[in-house]
Amino acid sequence: MKCCCLLTNCFPYLSCRTSDCSFQIGPFFIVDEPFTIENGLMTPTMKVRRDRVMSKYQEQIANLFK
C-alpha cells in the first residue's frame, strides 16, 4: 500500500521532469513476485527473459495502454 501511494505521487513529477526529453516514464506495473532463475523469468546470467515476462503478464501490460 505504501509503495503504491509513493509511486502514484511520484509519477506526475517524473512525467513533468521528462516532458522535454526524447523519452517518457511510464506507465508501469509492479509485480509482487521476484524475477528469478527458478521461476524462469531470469537467465543464469541474470538477464530478464523478456519473452517470458511478456507472456506471463500480457493481460496486465495490455491494460496499461488502454
Image (cartoon, grey):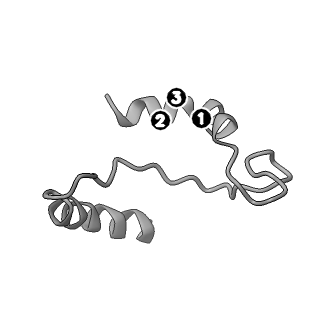
Contact (Cβ within 8 Å) of mark 1 with mark 3: no
C-alpha gap between disc 2 and disc 3 = 5 Å
Tell me the amino acid under the disc marked 3.
Answer: Glu
Q: Give left or right: position of 10 versus 60.
A: left
Q: Earlier in the sequence, mark 1 or mark 3?
A: 1
Q: Which residue is mark 1?
A: 54
Q: In the rendered image, which quarter is residue 57 located in?
A: top right
Contact (Cβ within 8 Å) of mark 2 with mark 3: yes
Q: Which residue is mark 3?
A: 59
Q: Position of residue 3 (x, y in %)?
A: 44, 68
C-alpha gap between disc 1 and disc 3 = 9 Å
Looking at the rendered structure, the secondary structure element under dot 1 is helix
C-alpha gap between disc 2 and disc 1 = 8 Å
Looking at the rendered structure, the secondary structure element under dot 2 is helix
Please name the residue shown 55% across and 30% down the image: 58
Q: Which residue is mark 2?
A: 61
Judging depth in this view, the residue of 5 and 65 nearest the camera is 65
Looking at the rendered structure, the secondary structure element under dot 3 is helix
- Mark 3 neighbour density, 10 Å: few (under 14) some (14–19) many (20 or more): few
| Quarter of the figure that contains the C terminus | top left
- Mark 2 neighbour density, 10 Å: few (under 14) some (14–19) many (20 or more): some
Q: Give left or right: position of 9 versus 6.
A: left
